[in-house]
């Protein structure tokens, strides 16, 4: 039976995408409330970043088991489980009176999003005709880009006029709507199988990611050679080695390390991760910069992020059209050049950024990000055989979340280190920490640009059309 993009399929994509939409909406909405949360819960900058870092880290540990979950349970059951975990987290967040309870609620939201996140892209890859794949992948990215656009404004207005808890109250209502539409429209993607759950491989991945993140974030308060930093980083690397050893010979591995031997896949994946690190780092820094350095309000911080996020959404859809007609190379390279130009200017002007400069450079960055990000995922996945797409999708989604957590932690750590300098006022130390972050991000995008020139195909993605 020929594949068609029907209204019911679009409803299914939107319903599945709502979990990732709400996850990102809450993430970007709470980012603009960080100064408020720091004051209300009496925490520091490096501690408050865990409100988002923890969610992304939990998602990164859940996504790797998505392929096995999809074989043992129906697609609709998986979707409803994701909604249930997400709703439980929202309820805890709404009533949390302590910072640790807020983190618990956010972690449960991460479980729900981690269960549901791969669904949208798996539905697109499985049900959408090949000649519409680039466009629909762009639409999928645009769903999350819309959350990026609305989140800061939503969070700023809600916090200024009500309280930050209303962010989660409103999200719970949207999650209920998603549960209703998804229960009707979510299709079954594959035949169910009795597969043996690979606990060892999953634990090795999960423990590795957690230890690496703990080690990195500990740099804000501990020297590099301390047990908290070196011990966690070393433990994370050992965990990755264990995963590599037990997975290499398993031809039905949870995530096959053999996929990384495909350089066209792994190098585009690297570019994808670097873009996510940069984006989440900027998303963390700009609201704090506007409020702490430029003395703006919470709602102003949200509105300043709005034009860039809109540009991201528009360019993501445009990039999908270009990819379908001309291939991935053009949108990826143009996007990276635009993002790099923005970051260079941010690094030069970082100590004295006006709100107008932030709007313009944020818009330039996000325009480039929208052009390149979904195109990198589409191009990277089409470097794999069709039967490898589910695992490739899981790898992209896992490392997307871990990279996002790493980007947030990077910005939070550098700001915290800079703010430890008590000889300068907080506005100065915040600006200095932001500039350090911009300089590091310039280096990451330069590396990404070099890798893209070398490994993004020069021709139209024939593998997409013929597979």
Image: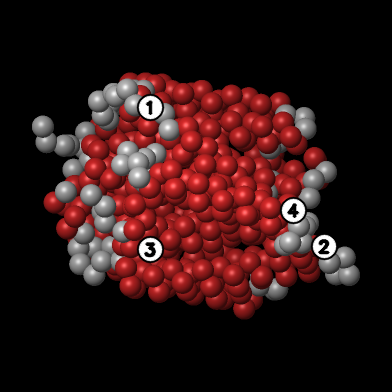
Given residues 356 and 395, the one toward you in this image is: 395
Query: x%, y% of residue 215?
Result: 67, 53
Q: Which residue is mark 3?
A: 267
Mark 2 falls on what kind of element? loop
Q: Mark 3 or mark 4: which is in front?
A: 4
Task: Give the Cα distance between marks 2 and 3.
Answer: 37 Å
Mark 1 falls on what kind of element? loop
Q: Residues within 10 Å of mark 2 (few under 14, many from 20)?
A: few
Given residues 154 and 444, the one toward you in this image is: 444
Q: Mark 4 or mark 2: which is in front?
A: 4
Q: Which residue is mark 2?
A: 420
Question: In screen coordinates, is 128 left or right of 416?
Answer: left
Q: Earlier in the sequence, mark 2 or mark 1?
A: 1
Q: Which residue is mark 4?
A: 227
Q: Earlier in the sequence, mark 3 or mark 1?
A: 1
Task: Give the Cα distance between marks 1 and 4.
Answer: 36 Å
Quadrant where the N terminus sits is top left
Q: Which residue is mark 1?
A: 196
Query: x%, y% of residue 381?
Result: 30, 52
Residue at the spot 20% in from the left edge and 67% down from the top edge: 459
Task: Give the Cα distance between marks 3 and 1.
Answer: 31 Å
Task: Give the Cα distance between marks 3 and 4.
Answer: 32 Å
């Amino acid at each position: 039976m020929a594949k068609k993009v029907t209204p019911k399929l679009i409803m299914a994509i939107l319903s599945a995408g709502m979990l990732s939409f709400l996850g990102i909406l809450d993430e970007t909405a709470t980012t603009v409330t960080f100064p408020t949360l720091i004051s209300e819960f009496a925490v520091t900058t490096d501690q408050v970043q865990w409100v988002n870092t923890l969610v992304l880290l939990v998602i990164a540990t859940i996504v790797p088991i998505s392929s096995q979950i999809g074989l043992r349970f129906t697609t609709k059951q998986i979707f409803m489980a994701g909604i249930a975990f997400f709703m439980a987290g929202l309820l805890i967040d709404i009533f949390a009176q302590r910072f640790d309870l807020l983190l618990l609620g956010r972690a449960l939201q991460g479980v729900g999003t981690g269960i549901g996140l791969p669904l949208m892209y798996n539905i697109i890859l499985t049900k959408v005709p090949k000649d519409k794949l680039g466009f629909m992948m762009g639409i999928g990215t645009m769903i999350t880009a819309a959350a990026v656009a609305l989140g800061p404004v939503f969070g700023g207005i809600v916090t200024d006029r009500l309280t930050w808890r209303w962010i989660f109250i409103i999200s719970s209502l949207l999650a209920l709507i998603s549960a209703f539409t998804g229960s009707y429209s979510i299709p079954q993607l594959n035949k169910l199988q009795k597969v043996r759950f690979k606990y060892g491989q999953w634990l090795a991945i999960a423990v590795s990611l957690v230890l690496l993140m703990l080690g990195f974030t500990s740099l804000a308060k501990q020297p590099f050679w301390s047990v908290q930093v070196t011990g966690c980083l070393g433990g994370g690397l050992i965990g990755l080695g264990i995963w590599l050893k037990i997975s290499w010979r398993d031809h039905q591995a949870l995530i096959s390390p053999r996929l990384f031997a495909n350089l066209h896949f792994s190098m585009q994946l690297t570019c994808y991760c670097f873009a996510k690190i940069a984006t989440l780092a900027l998303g963390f820094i700009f609201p704090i910069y506007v409020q702490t350095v430029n003395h703006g309000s919470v709602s102003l911080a949200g509105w300043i992020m709005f034009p860039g996020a809109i540009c991201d959404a528009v360019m993501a859809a445009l990039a999908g059209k270009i990819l379908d007609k001309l291939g991935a190379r053009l949108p990826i390279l143009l996007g990276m050049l635009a993002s790099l130009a923005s970051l260079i200017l941010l690094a030069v002007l970082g100590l004295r950024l006006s709100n107008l400069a932030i709007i313009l450079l944020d818009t330039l960055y996000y325009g480039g990000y929208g052009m390149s990000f979904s195109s990198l995922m589409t191009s990277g996945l089409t470097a794999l055989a069709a039967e490898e797409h589910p695992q490739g999708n899981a790898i992209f989604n896992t490392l997307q979340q871990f990279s996002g957590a790493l980007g947030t932690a990077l910005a939070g750590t550098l700001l915290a280190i800079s703010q430890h300098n008590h000889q300068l006022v907080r506005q100065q130390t915040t600006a200095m920490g932001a500039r350090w972050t911009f300089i590091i991000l310039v280096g990451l995008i330069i590396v990404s640009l070099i890798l893209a020139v070398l490994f993004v195909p020069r021709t139209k993605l024939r593998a997409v059309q013929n597979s």
